[in-house]
Amino acid sequence: MPEPTEFIVKDCALVTLATGVRAQSLTALREGLLGVPADSVYHHFWGGLLGTRFDDPEFNNDFAAWVRHALHDLPLAERLAVIDPAQFVDAEALRQEVLEVVEQRLDELDTPLWAPRDRQFSFVRGQVVVFDTGRRLSEAHELVQVLPQLSPGSVFYHVIDARSRAPQSCDDFSSWLRELPDSHDTLLARLADIDPYFVTLAELRQQYIDVITSHFGGASS
Amino acid sequence: MSALLDSYADVAGADVVQHLRQLAAPLRGLKIVNINSTRAGGGVAEILHKLVPLMQALELDVRWEVITGGGAFYQCTKAMHNALQGQPAPLSEALLRAYEQTNADNAETLAPVLRDADVVFIHDPQPAALLRYLGERKGKWIWRCHIDASHPQRSVWRYLREFIADYDASVFSLADFARPLPHPVYLVPPSIDPLSEKNRDLPAWQVTEACHRHQVDSERPLMLQVSRFDRFKDPLGVIAAYRLARQFMPALQLVLAGGSADDDPEGAAVLEEVHAAAAGDDDIKVLLLPSDAHLTINALQRAGQFVLQKSLREGFGLTVTEAMWKGKPVIGGDTGGIRLQVINHHTGFLVSTPEGAALRVRYLHQRGDIAAEMGAKAREFVRENFLITRQLRDYLTLVTSVLHAREGRLELS
């Protein structure tokens, strides 16, 4: 029988890079979407999570916010805001969806939409640097102790970034629980219900703490 | 843990300092060199005086060297600085030759340090040509531009670009400031130092004392704008907003605080207009403060209930960050870097007119509960995004990224 896998607790930091691509109109946004690396599109959906997010953000991704505040096109802003990046298998699929929505709107419009010069959309991308914290878990219940100590970078890496790495687009905790000898089906179902798109990393961590603590009955060892 | 790191952990959070330690660990043993053109005066020297000791406290081998030059060199680099910010600044061939010669001379003097360095940060245009004259090098060279270069004089940028293109990476403060270059261009926003004289906590008596010194009644509501007397900062718009708000708040006072405009003819003209607009109202104080009046500014920012930065055009706007760190919601012009800090209805209000500013002053006056809530959010927003510890984290991350020269996710073993 193989040895149970250890969970390696990692942390990450994100640094932003300019792509040099800017858009001042909806047509230019479409061209930018076609030309930038797919990870730039991904960054404009998820990158904000490693910064501060407020209680009730009007729009959850940079494209929707720019269309609303710079182009003042509310219908398109709403259509872009409803795109949930977690539903797409990879950044390329996400790019195609954003393009689809933008192109549909371009077909509907009679006049081009322009932003003021000082409100251009700057495409950026992120570089995530991941490092090992040295912490290891060998049993599922250890999560009860470790989760409250996770930094926002750890939560980002193991929950958000994990979705682009795991074959099943799930968080690292769930991937690990599936590999353990004991069955954790009930816990896995509850973890799968957590939607990371509308909360801060601190709130996301709390949701994981609540689910895991209640599952293990508050056990701390 | 060092005392310096301890003191930052107290204000920025122990988790933030722990994060820095983990990022710094793989960089220990590397020789990192910073080069600029002065040890005193100016924002770059100010930030290096903080960053270098912090990096040393993280057990990194960091040095800070300064290049030296003559009058023609500094005349040239001052013109370059203005030109990068978009002001017309013709550069004669003689000045450009002085720039090149000074860089060549300094490259020779600093060669032992620079050739041996693993990472070299070159700050702003003054030492940008060092790399060209150094010849052999083993390390990665990063050009750090602290200037808003979004609309530079094209001829000057074309000249500088020839030198900068040879670097391994560049760093700009905001995406809007960045120039296209043939290497990775990183974005690291500015930051404030929470332990500096301008930002550290002050006892209440010191705030009251500063108010008394400038004939401000600390018992009455105070509206404040701290900035140069410059048309783009719209001080006349602030006075108009004050007059509109005062119709509903008769006890309201206004302080416009900024540096002396002696060497700036345009600034002197604006200051004259401000004095004329304020004439006859003893509750408007126009304060010309010396450049080292950090404690006074700190105290006034703490005394003001309504902090404005009603700019019509703005680079980043660090006075906004400073006020937010003191728990003040800021009423800011809807422009430039203010938009990155003032999140409408969360950390303050974005406005476009004196009428808009006056309305928000009245609102914050009436809704002290919401003002306090927004102020707390503003401080937390700065804690997470605009403290020097975040800037250091970005530098450590980008150094790691540049050393590995790989795109996407970078997993350190």
Image (spheres, coloured by chain):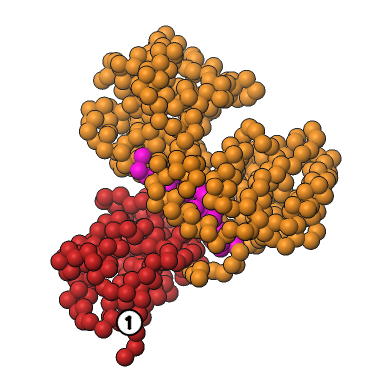
Chain colours: A red, B orange
Magenta segment boundaries in residue numbering: B379-402
Q: Position of residue B216 (x, y in %)?
A: 39, 14
Q: Say which element carries label 1.
A: loop
Is B389 in the magenta?
A: yes
Vertical arrangement, residue A20 with respect to residue A141, above or below: above
- Kindly identify the residue that appears in the image at 62 percent across and 34 percent down: B42
- Kindly identify the residue that appears in the image at 42 percent across and 51 percent down: B16
Q: Residue furthest bottom?
A: A1
Q: Residues within 10 Å of mark 1 (few under 14, many from 20)?
A: few
Residue B189 appears anywhere in the view: no
Q: Which residue is mark 1?
A: A4
- Kindly identify the residue that appears in the image at 27 percent across and 62 percent down: A145
Dominant secondary-structure state across the stretch colored magenta: helix
Q: Position of residue B307 (x, y in %)?
A: 38, 29
Vertical arrangement, residue B69 with respect to residue A90, above or below: above
Quadrant of residue B245 in the image?
top left
